[in-house]
Amino acid sequence: MSNQEQAGVLVSQLVDSVREFAGLPECRNAARDLYGSLVRRVKLLGPLFDELKDSEQQVDDDDDLDGLKCLKFALDLGLDLLKAVNYGSKTFQALQIDRTIKKFHRVTTQIEEALCKIRYDRFDVPEEIREQIQLVHSQFKRAKTQTESPDSQLQTDLTMVKMGKDPDPEMVKRLAEKLHLTTIDDLRKESLAIHEMVVLTGGAEFDSSFDTVSFVLKKINDFVMLGNFEIEDSDREKRFARHRSPVIPDDFRCPISLELMKDPVIVSTGQTYERSCIQKWLDAGHKTCPKTQLTLQHTSLTPNYVLKSLIALWCDSNGIELPKSQENSKARRTSSECDQTSITALLEKLTNGNLNEKRAAAGELRLLAKRNADNRICIADNGAIPILVELLSSGDSRTQEHAVTALLNLSINEANKGIIVSVGAIPEIVDVLKNGSVEARENAAAALFSLSVVDEYKVAIGAAGAIPPLIDLLQHGTPRGKKDAATAIFNLCIYQGNKVRAVRAGIVGPLMRLVKDASGGMMDEALAILAIIAGHHEGKVAIGQADPVPVLVEVVRTGSPRNRENGVAILWCLCAGDVECLMIMKGVGGEDVLTELCEHGTDRAKRKAGSLLELIQRAEFGEPVAN
């Protein structure tokens, strides 16, 4: 292809890129100023490329061609950044704003450097367009040398939360307004963004911010639900005590039964119903939406995970236990909203292609499954899951990586989890976890975490021998791999039998090393796992043999609110009924630490600290210390 032909293609691509920038929605999070500035400046480049495309003038200079290539690359990076910023968690974006600022600066620098290579002053374009491009170039040049400052008040409030300060009503109000989380719909979208991020990454992208994100979201959720900024937590508890049956928000009621929804699902009209109610309606032969009376395009039901999460938060705030419900694994949406032709072609290559074709097809399905919910349903409906499971035993490491990652992405859909397990994937995924490449092992761990959300699968995964290789990954994996392993182990250990497996596989030693090494960035995860296995007798014994008390007392003295809570919970499990352990804790200054925690800890931490202080006092007077 000649330089002129390459330039023509690049100019057309740049026209499309600028139009894509212009079509992006408004950003409503902590990065909105950075987002808006980049969109505005790139849009101003549009007239130049439109003119070059329409006039078909010669652009064949090597420097100009190189500049166009660099600019296309920089704009692609910018688009990816803008989409990630706009569709991600608002809370997470605010916590990571310094990192986001650096990313915007890199994109700005690359665009400016690309413009320097394009000698646009020699192009035959109208003078006003040339002046506009010179102005935009100057703006990019200035932006490259400037340092953006985040919202100081927002960062101050978030820093206070990260330091363990329980936000007062005014702080919650500021956070809600600055993060643009002031309505139930805002919270739905935020919850969905967090859900997608956790499931796709196993929590790895959140680093140590996940606890803060969850805590802030819960506080703002309480505020939105109550609709009153002036109620302190203690007053809220009294209010709930007075009203044992709080008013259920209308959005949380099924339009058919008017009861609190346990398993909300969406029909084709976009309305949400309790699954059992709408299923009865459909089974009776109705073809319309009960609320809108519109004809249903199809009768498939889609789980409304975001609303389900919000209902769970509301129930937790109101002291209501939400009964578990069984989802109908056969409820599926049609594949009308995905590229049926492409998926069919990929499955043909996956089944009958040569090694290279299978590898490429698995990679394409991996990306399609990551992109959106419709693709995940469509791919599964076309029978891809059994074929991908077969590829887990492929001798080609890259094909194996693509297959296990595709299954991870597909497992985000609740019904797909059942299909994946039913075709015998768990032992195959465990084998990849043991013997695969670094990337394959990490994604196998994340896939097991995703599947273990279903309680019965926790049992099957543990029985398949997943815990020992997860412990190995926890010790020797990359930072992301360690996070994936930790989240999977934590979820599996919710089942009692897996606690025993983890303890007997030697998990306590690695966890204690991670707690002692704060620089490793895994203390949060290690303490959470220790807290869950300390409640089992074998776990308590194993932890007790690791001389944990001084380390845990230091965690309770200096750790984050969540780590202090987990630390004191572990101490409580160890010391209840053990005078020697209580005296060791007293000897390393535990009483003062517990007293301070009773004043400034979370509610759960205060209760545990108070119980431990009472046990220490009993031990000093020779009274029984069982609790």
Image (tube, rainbow, N blue to C red):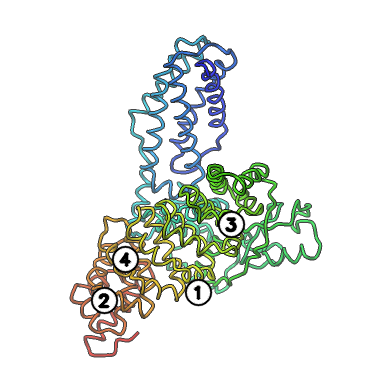
Amino acid at the residue labelled 1? Ala
**Which label is found at residue 413?**
3
Please give left or right for residue 363 compared with residue 208 in the image: right
Which of pointers 1 and 3 lies earlier in the amino acid sequence?
A: 1
**Which label is found at residue 511?**
4
Badge 4 local density, few (<14 within 10 Å), some, or many (20+)? many
Which of pointers 2 and 1 lies earlier in the amino acid sequence?
A: 1
In the depicted structure, whether residue 470 falls above or below residue 153: below
Relative image position of residue 613 (x, y in whole percent): 28, 78
Q: Secondary structure at mark 1?
A: helix
For disc 2, the marked residue is 545
- Residue at 57% across, 44% down: 354
- Residue at 55% across, 35% down: 24
Relative image position of residue 116 (x, y in whole percent): 39, 19
**Front in this rendered view, residue 368 or 208:** 368
Which of pointers 2 and 4 lies earlier in the amino acid sequence?
A: 4
**Front in this rendered view, residue 30 or 374:** 374
Distance in Å between CA atoms under marks 1 and 3:
38 Å
Foreground mark, 1 or 4, reads 4
Relative image position of residue 402 (x, y in whole percent): 50, 49
Q: Quadrant of residue 357?
A: top right
Which of pointers 3 and 2 lies earlier in the amino acid sequence?
A: 3
Badge 1 local density, few (<14 within 10 Å), some, or many (20+)? few
